[in-house]
Amino acid sequence: MALIVQKYGGTSVANADRIRNLASRVGRFKKKGHQIVVVVSAMSGETNRLIALAHEVTPTPDPRELDVIISTGEQVTIGLTCLALHELGFKAKSYTGSQVRILTDESHGKARIIDIDGHNMQKDLDDGYVVVVAGFQGCDAKGNITTLGRGGSDTTGVALAAALKADECQIYTDVDGVYTTDPRVVPEARRLDRITFEEMLELASQGSKVLQTRSVEFAGKHKVKLRVLSSFQEVGEGTLITFEEDSKDDNMEEPLISGIAFNRDEAKVTILGVPDTPGIAYQVLGPVADANIDVDMIIQNQGADGTTDITFTVHKNEMNKALEILRNKVQPLIHAREIKGDDNIAKISVVGVGMRSHVGVASQMFRTLSEEGINIQMISTSEIKIAVVIEEKYMELAVRTLHQAFELEET
Ligand code: ASP
Ligand code: MG
């Protein structure tokens, strides 16, 4: 007997038929004697619909009330999932985030989980129930409903798996695993049998939409065994997310590159000609961080004339807010020559632990892009990642040619 957490995404609960399918799959696991916790997302499109609805009422919805609204999608699907399980003769009980007591901090819209009370769930499991929990939501210490950020049901799944010390956390989605890149852009993309947590974390944070970044982080930290599977196929091992040490046992040669992620959600903010004095980066980026704007890449370049240029990237939705802060709060102190934004960019990242022991990956990437006449605007690297910012219109071309250059296709 194993304790398994199964998380089902929006497409897996998109209508009554799919929910019935989900229930039969859960039922099959239950019949094998396993204890099952199901985490569901809202029906696909529902969270977007609720956000749009709130914006019809006001362009600037209050974050607390927005969370009250957008957490309802998952409340519907937990109830429906339990009904479908009851129809099949299984005992099942639903829980919202606050009923479990998934305790989070107070940052509405991107709350972090602080603690999970597993007692009631464990008791239900021991009594033979399938426990069905609403993804994406929790509550703060005062009882306010919070949400965990888009795609946050993955994090709920992983966090429950950690809290309940589950044997495995299975993420069911509309693809049958993690691919070398998005098959919609490169049809030759290949499913990976396994990938390391570090690689998955880079891919997720660089734009791969298969798993929410936080869920991977959480799973890595708490050593949760994580597997991505298709909810539309009966068979298949999906992709197992492993620890590098474990995957090395296989004696398999590590691939140089495991995957390519891309992201067109970022925008570039550039501050030209600020005095090159100690503390300038802090003066520029401090107020941006204080406004809770996530900054991704940062580049600072010293000029010859005693000034320096700073460029950084933020989410497209936050570019104007960042520019406003810089122009109104920062500019009077730093007197930059120019402050400008550009949201016509895309970021492409190649990721692989094999990079650690090989040189030349960066130069191969740059050569491939130059052969296509694609200009690189920014570069950033980590031990296992090289990311470039290019003009948005070249994104698909860049992904396709890099996928080929690194021989990631199906063979
Ligand atoms: N329903 C939420 C969203 O669409 C959470 C999730 O699906 O994971 O972002
Ligand atoms: Mg998702």
Image: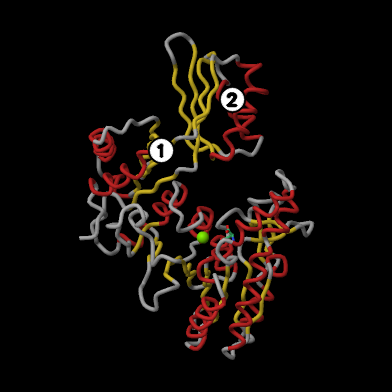
Q: Residue at x 22, y 51 (%)?
A: 407
Instruction: Judge from the rendering whether residue 353 lies leftward or rightward of residue 329; answer left or right.
Output: left
Quarter-of-image position of residue 292: top right
Q: Earlier in the sequence, mark 1 or mark 2?
A: 2
Three-letter amino acid code at the position of disc 2: Val
**SS of the residue under disc 2:** helix
**CA separation in Å, label 1 and label 2:** 26 Å
Disc on res. 243 = none
- All told, the count of numbered labels is 2
Quarter-of-image position of residue 253: bottom left
Q: Residue at x 35, y 49 (%)?
A: 260
Disc on res. 284 = 2
Q: Image height check: is 121 above or below 68?
A: below
Residue 123 point in image, percent of width and height: 66, 80
Q: Residue at x 53, y 54 (%)?
A: 214
**Residue sitting at the far front:** 56
**Of 352 and 48, the residue lying toward us:** 48
The residue wearing badge 1 is 392
**Of 370 and 31, the residue lying toward us:** 370
Q: Image height check: is 329 above or below 367?
A: above
Residue 80 point in image, percent of width and height: 63, 77
Q: Residues within 10 Å of mark 2 (few under 14, many from 20)?
A: many
